[in-house]
Amino acid sequence: MNFQEISVSPVTYNSELNPLLWENNHLETTVRYKLMSIALHFAKFLNVTKLNLRDITISGSNAAYGYGPHSDLDLHLVVDMPKDQPELAELYTAKKNQYNFTYDINIKGIDVELYVQDVQQPHHSAGIYSVLNDHWLVKPTHKIPHIRDAEVKSKARNYASKINQAMRSNDLNTAEETMSDIRRLRQTGLQAGGEYSVENLAFKLLRARGKIDKFHKHIDKLTSAKLSLGEQNEDQ
């Protein structure tokens, strides 16, 4: 993957919020109702006795000015996770992955991705909108970002090198640790510089080029192999 020959796109910037979703800086009514319906369906799918739902929000590029043709719509169930039940976070992650894999949901052609977010967990996004209460929690500002192309490509090459090394190792622990490390670096970038940080843009560049998806599939393959038992040799 030659990062010198490609643009940092799909990073884009627009003069208005996505008109498919927004009307006068508020979520279009039919869109809001449909998102509420999706959130309810997801909540039932989680099948948790006490969900402790605090809000339903959308965030990311489609809640700000940086959306593009391939941007998802991130729909979050914000819940109060009991501190004495840390295993819930893993359950929610597994259920979220299963739901997004099972259901192909879109709003006016925009893919909807479901998440469960702990109300105590800081969430960094250029725009956050409460679907439940129909108002902005973090209103996006119209400020064209300065994208440092060379730095983003350099960081993307660094991430790609880590991924390639992990895949060559064919070791599940190495692959999982590498993915966790890259996600941690991305989160650090989001906290420090927001959605247009070098770390986040490098991650999005790799994802747009299929590298992250390929790595996920490699980890799934290694996990399946670890959990499987091959046939024994008949001579034994």
Image (tube, helix red, strand yellow):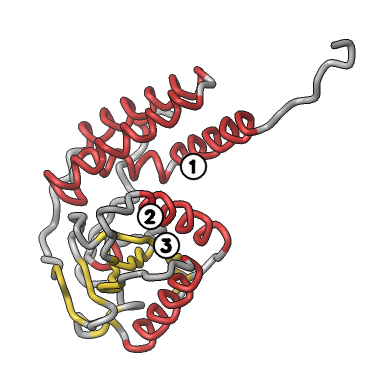
Q: Could you tell me which secondary element the residue under label 3 belongs to?
A: strand
Q: Amino acid at mark 2?
A: Leu
Compared with 220, 124 (above or below) is below
Mark 3 highlights which residue?
A: 113
Residue 56 placement, left or right of 173: left
Q: Can you identify the residue that label 1 sits on? A: 213
Q: Residue 97: in sight, yes or no?
A: yes
Residue 88 numbered mark, or none: 2
Q: Image quarter for residue 66? A: bottom left
User: How far is disc 3 from disc 1 in space, using C-alphas?
Assistant: 15 Å
- Circle 2 sits in a helix, a strand or a loop, which is it? helix
Q: Amino acid at mark 1?
A: Asp
Q: Quadrant of residue 77?
A: bottom left
- Dot 2: few (<14), some (14–19), or many (≥20) neighbours within 10 Å? some
Viewer-proximal residue, 122 or 58?
A: 122
Q: Is 18 placed above or below 197 here?
A: below
